[in-house]
Image: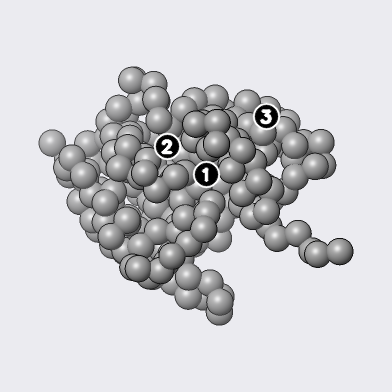
Amino acid sequence: MTAQGPDDDARRLSGDAFREGDATGWFERLYAEAADGRAIVPWDRRAPHPLLVEWIEQQAGLSGGRTLVVGSGFGDDAAYLAAQGYRVIAFDISVSAIEAARRRFPASPVDFRVADLLNPPAEWRHHFDLVVETYTTQALPVRLRPTVTLHVGHFVASGGILLVLAVARDAGQSVDGPPWPLTRADIESFAVEGLEMVSVEELTDPPGSHRWRAVLARPPR
């Protein structure tokens, strides 16, 4: 019997959805099957992302700000941020994911919501002091990347910050996703409509990993 890879269920379900012309419906199928023990959610860490934790620990003046967690999944990043004093809205397109997050963190003040990154609420435009995007972009088809990066950037308020975490790949390296890891050019594509790149870290610790951590900011008016 061949051992199952962590991305196998995501690729199986996304393939079915893509053949039906649906770029995002597979997220609900994945989380629903995971709830029944029939699938693995490959990005489920059961802990906040360590690169997020490391970065937040270095930020002295952001706590208390209006914060949006994009594609929040089971809610670990959102709950962590709320525990640090951030006022958090966390959203996912999957109803099953949001229900699971609410069950996991019943005492957390996070406002967990179902929403679609490709058609987000209009009132979120330029509304958040901190936006956290962890691995959502790389889970969506490459053809949607301009739309995704634009919508993520639109969430950032004047004077606000966007933190992007993603698996990295080299330019020209072919991938058969999902996921579709991001190149340096993909990371730089978040700098649209007034967002400015503050820093890009290419991280290879622990050994064998290859990830981006990028910070962008919208200058105060």
Percent from the top left, x then y, of residue 196?
Answer: 20, 51
Verify CB contact (< 8 Å) between mark 1 and mark 2.
yes
Instruction: State the colouring used for the structure image.
Output: one colour
Q: Is residue 86 visible?
A: no
Crowdedness near tag 1: few (<14), some (14–19) or many (≥20) residues, C-alpha within 10 Å: many
Percent from the top left, x then y, of residue 207?
Answer: 55, 79
For badge 2, the amino acid type reads: Thr
Q: Specify which label sits upstream in the sequence, 3 or 1.
A: 1
Residue that carries the numbered disc 2 in the rendered image: 67
Residue that carries the numbered disc 1 in the rendered image: 81
Q: CA distance from mark 3 to mark 1?
A: 21 Å
Q: Residue furthest left?
A: 221
Residue that carries the numbered disc 3 in the rendered image: 96
Up the image or down, 68 lies above or below 173; here it is above
Up the image or down, 116 lies above or below 6; here it is above
Percent from the top left, x then y, of residue 130?
Answer: 37, 42
For badge 3, the amino acid type reads: Ser
Q: Nearer the viewer, residue 143 or 132?
A: 143
Residue mark closest to the camera, 2 vs 3: 3
- At x 58% / y 42%, what residue is drawn? 14
Which part of the image, by quadrant, shows the C terminus? Answer: top left
Q: Specify which label sits upstream in the sequence, 1 or 2.
A: 2
Verify CB contact (< 8 Å) between mark 2 and mark 3.
no
